[in-house]
Amino acid sequence: MAPVRIKDHWREQRMFNRRAWFAGALMVLAACAVLGRLYYLQVVRQHYYEVLSLDNGVRTVPIPAARGLILDRNGEVIASNRPTFDLDLTRDEVPDLHDELEHLVRLGMLQQTDLPELIRTIRSHQPFDTVPIRLDLSAQEVARFAVRRYEFPGIDVGSRQARWYPFGKLAVDAIGYVGTISASELAHLNQAAYAGTAVIGQTGVEATYEKYLHGTNGYRQTLVDALGRPVRRPGALGRELHFKAPVPGDDVVLSLDLKLQRLAEQLLKGQDGAVVAIDPWNGDVIAMASSPSFDPNLFARGITEKEYRALTDDPRRPMFNRALRAQLPSGSTIKPALALGALTDGVINADDRIYASDAYHLPGSRHLYHNAMHETCGWVGLRMAIIMSCDVYFYRLAHEMGIDRLSAWLPNFGFGHRTGIDIPGEDRGLVPSRAWKRRQFSNPAQGEWFPGDTVILGIGQGYFLVTPLQLAHYTAMLATRGLSYEPRLVTGVRNPGTGKIHWKRPVLNANLTMINPAAWQVVVNAMVGVTTNPRGTAYWQLHTSSYPIAGKTGTAQLVREGAKGASNEGSYHADKTLKQLRDDAWFIAFAPANAPRIAIAVLVEHAGWGSSGAAPIAHKLLDAYLLGPDGKLVAHPGRGPYSEPASIRARITPGVDPHMTALQQAAAP
Amino acid sequence: MIYEEFSTDSRTRRTLSGAARVLLALKVDGPLAVGLALTAAYGLVVLYSASAENTPMLMRTGLRLVLGTVIMLAVARISPNLLRRLSPWLYGLGVFLLLAVAAVGHVHLGAKRWLDLGPIHFQPSELMKLAVPMMCAWYLDERPLPPRWSDLGMLALIILAPVGLVAKEPDLGTAALIAAGGAVVIFLSGLRARVLIGLLLLAVLAGVVGLRFMHGYQRERLLTFLNPEAHPLSAGYHIIQSQIAVGSGGIFGKGWMAGSQAQLNFLPERTTDFIFAVIGEEFGLLGLAVLLLLYAFVIGRSIYLAMLCPDTFSRLLSGSIALTFFVYVFINAGMVTGLVPVVGVPLPLVSYGGSSVVTVLSGFGILMALFSHRKLMG
């Protein structure tokens, strides 16, 4: 049995005191634990947590730089910027991405078909990045969205500068366009530099000169609360926020002359074709047109699926840049090159005359190669053969040169490889050779080079393919008697702040010094004869010109009657053939022939003869460029600030002194 | 001792004696009152910043402090005898109200904690924070100490009945605090060390078992405490953000109203359970040290007063009030700094919140009553 216990107050007091002291010791220990923990958090790891707290509240908002302008040679603005309203999405703040985007589709702000690509693009960004999901809202759309904004957390209307092409489709094939940055493009970009940028150059000058036009984005640090909302009055918290102003992109100065460009597009209107005009002394592209074309503003504001399909489904292919990519037989425009090659190699003598009947046949063959109109040339020398474009003469010339010499000569004039123009998408055309043909056919019998293949090469038919740009470049080489300047659309880059233009030096790629001046003289004279001699193929179109024009017509055959494309049994009647099957008309020219300032190539597809289809267009363009309002030659067209070396200049007597364009004058010190 | 102070000749003492006489009449302990007032004032300064200059919130807190002070003064005048005799009645009332909550309680934020009494919402569990230690002290007062096994069984029943009801509400934090209040009484009553250790082990065991019966969010809270980074956006968010706030404050803090974690809402419940982190962020380690010193003074003074109490009931009860106050502070500071799991325990006298201030000040009222009436008890 337990002893009876009675309360002992003194003992209880002592016990309580002991316990109280013990509790006190425990509390001191606990306080030390808390203080130790605080020391660890606030002293040892202070920097770590400070960084975390900054990451929490400070958001860096990029400020996109204003994209540089694109100007023509006279300073006319062809690509600028204008303020627009966009829908911006921040994935972090969107509760259900699919749900919200579907909701926007129901509101008519997005297309259902765009969603998969859009979601891919959004996901390729950082979750806290703001991604534009719809560009260029109309005022109505802004209002429609504004009243329902609360239904779309994480989506907001933002305003930004959008690309604006004030003249619509003018020169679109040269300047290209900008479009929304796609997920695949984003993967190759410096994402830090492009944070905040909505569009990127897709083709043309906009693409090639992207790094100049883009500029340097700035940023602004803002405070956001835990819900990601910007803090309007940061007060004491705002002291540490940084700001960096964007640096606008450089302006790009084109070689294009918009006056001529407008006229070129106007003349091509309703037809499929292309015009390329080049300043032969520096490679400046004065005009580059492809018809039909399209409005780049569609892409700048965000093209819809339907609009895009309408463009790609159009049988006339408006998006196809014919100036760079149409690969066609050159037709007779190649004859001056062949003549130069034959003269230089000594295959023919300029003064030798041969009798050219209405047809040519290879030795030992009964197959006949006819003149285009089945006409008889009669006794002709090289000069006359070019003037009247005598096919029989050139069938024979080609045969006598042989394929090996031909395939060695043609690349000298820039055929078969890219000219190197400063915009993407150029095609290289084709200069056939024995080796090339062997590669094309697996059957060695078919892959053999036939003499007939060579014969038709004499009139620019068969396997030989050129682009309008290549022909214009070649014409410029004829004009300068052998100088191959790299064609270029951009002549300078202007700093928008200082207005100073950094001019680019023209690139001289080749100089055909192996051709002697006498040969040039014969060929150039013959080309002048094309427009001035009554038997010339372009005489009726161009003989009224007040200045000498050196030209050459060409007709690229599309209708091929023979199995090998070599036969030409019946004569060709353009007006009797269906339009789609009609031949493509070429005309190349440079003028003034004695002091060339412009070289031009005109292609009109399915126009029939080069003389009637393309020559009048070339004539109007030459007049517009060279003649003043009084109908006299003006001294205005510029040479650019870089003049060619005296040795090169000596090879031709320039008719006029070099003059600067308005822009170049403005930029000169 | 107070009489001795009066008898000195010092002018200063004599001037002070005027104030001391008032305090004596009010049965208020001066140093303790000053400590409490300083802590509350500090709390108001912090709350002004933590609430983003929310004046109505400040006004309400001020009113509650006034109400708490009035109740404290009133309670301080009650004689310890009466307090002792009231204890079982108060405890009974508390249990009854808890049962009433379980039956007809007002559900708020998914928990049934409130009794809707017309204009005011009353939380009976707050009453139990005081009633349970009073009941335990009352029970032990008549028995020889240290308590025997049978006493322990009875005390366990006294403690665990209300704790179970509160935990069921569910309000695990308050339940733990109520249990702590009772347990502290047992500890102070001189329970043998080996029994104490055994009971502690038992409690740990019960905790492990209890984990299985916890609500999902309660268990998650405990588990995320062990690994907060596993749930950075859900359960671990509180812990991570409060540690960022405290840590980024450094030694001197970011300045009053300049804590980005608090001002930009990254810190959850920054006016209530996590206000400790606001102090850490804006006033730094120094600010927290000042706060902890204030608390240490209040607790130390309370224990000192408890040791001077003449009878077992007074000693145990005032000791329990002092130690429970410490438990509040420790759990809150530990939870904010990541030392203990997140349980909803406010920082006493600083956190914004209704009943807590009143309960804490009532507790100190009881403490003052027990001490200042001791002469009358003889």
Image (cartoon, coloured by chain):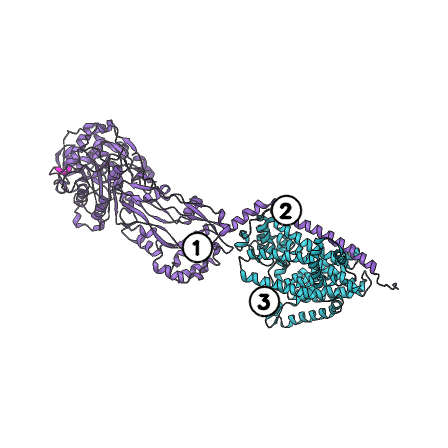
Query: Residue A454, how many percent across, how many down?
Result: 24, 36
Query: Residue A488, how many percent across, how many down?
Result: 29, 38
| Residue holding disc 3 | B108
Q: Secondary structure at mark 2?
A: helix
Mark closer to the chain start, 2 or 1: 2
Q: Residues within 10 Å of mark 3 (few under 14, many from 20)?
A: few
**Chain coloured cyan:** B
Residue at the spot 66% in from the left edge and 72% down from the top edge: B100
Taking depth in this image into account, of A326 and B29 the one nearest to the observer is B29
Query: Residue B229, how many percent across, how many down?
Result: 59, 51
Chain A painted colour: purple
| Residue holding disc 2 | A39
In the rendered image, which quarter is residue A494 located in? Answer: top left
| Residue holding disc 1 | A89
On what subunit does the disc labeled 3 rest? B
Which residues fall within the magenta stretch?
A530-535
- Amino acid type of disc 2? Tyr
